[in-house]
Image (spheres, rainbow, N blue to C red):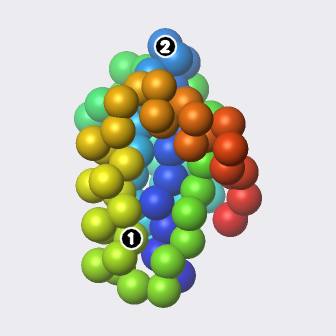
Amino acid sequence: MHYVYIVECHDGSYYTGYTTDVERRVSEHNDGTGAKYTRGRTPVDLVYTESFDSKSTAMSREYAIKQLTRREKERLVDDGSATV
């Protein structure tokens, strides 16, 4: 499976990413080996995930989420669930 996820950083900002292993990726963000953006904003909390059968579909969705405004992302997080 391929996943798109959103984590909320310690400063309240959101980071959206793609992975095949959400648990491992969140752990990487929290131990400082994840994305450069999250390194200074730990700890992060997983707040949203979506799963996909193909990498290309997941990557397209990641891009679409990254284009959303903060308010739209908040709505997505509030309406969704952080289950894998």
Q: Is residue 31 visible?
A: no
Callout 1 secondary element: helix
Tell me the residue at 47%/25% (across/down): 71
Location of mark 1 (residue): 58
Nearest the camera: 3 or 63?
A: 63
Tell me the residue at 46%/41% (across/down): 29
Callout 2 secondary element: loop
Q: Is residue 1 visible?
A: yes
Nearest the camera: 5 or 41?
A: 5
Residue 16: percent from the left, percent from the top?
40, 45
Determine whether 22 is above or below 69 in the image. below
Label 1 amino acid? Ala
Tell me the residue at 49%/13% (across/down): 11
Determine whether 28 is above or below 31 in the image. below
Give the mark, 2 or 1, whose residue is nearer the N terminus: 2
Quarter holding residue 23 = bottom right
Determine whether 80 is above or below 52 in the image. above
Residue 37: percent from the left, percent from the top?
30, 31
Location of mark 2 (residue): 11
Pointer 2 local density, CA inside 10 Å: few below 14, some 14–19, many at least 20? few
Label 2 amino acid? Asp
Residue 27: percent from the left, percent from the top?
56, 47
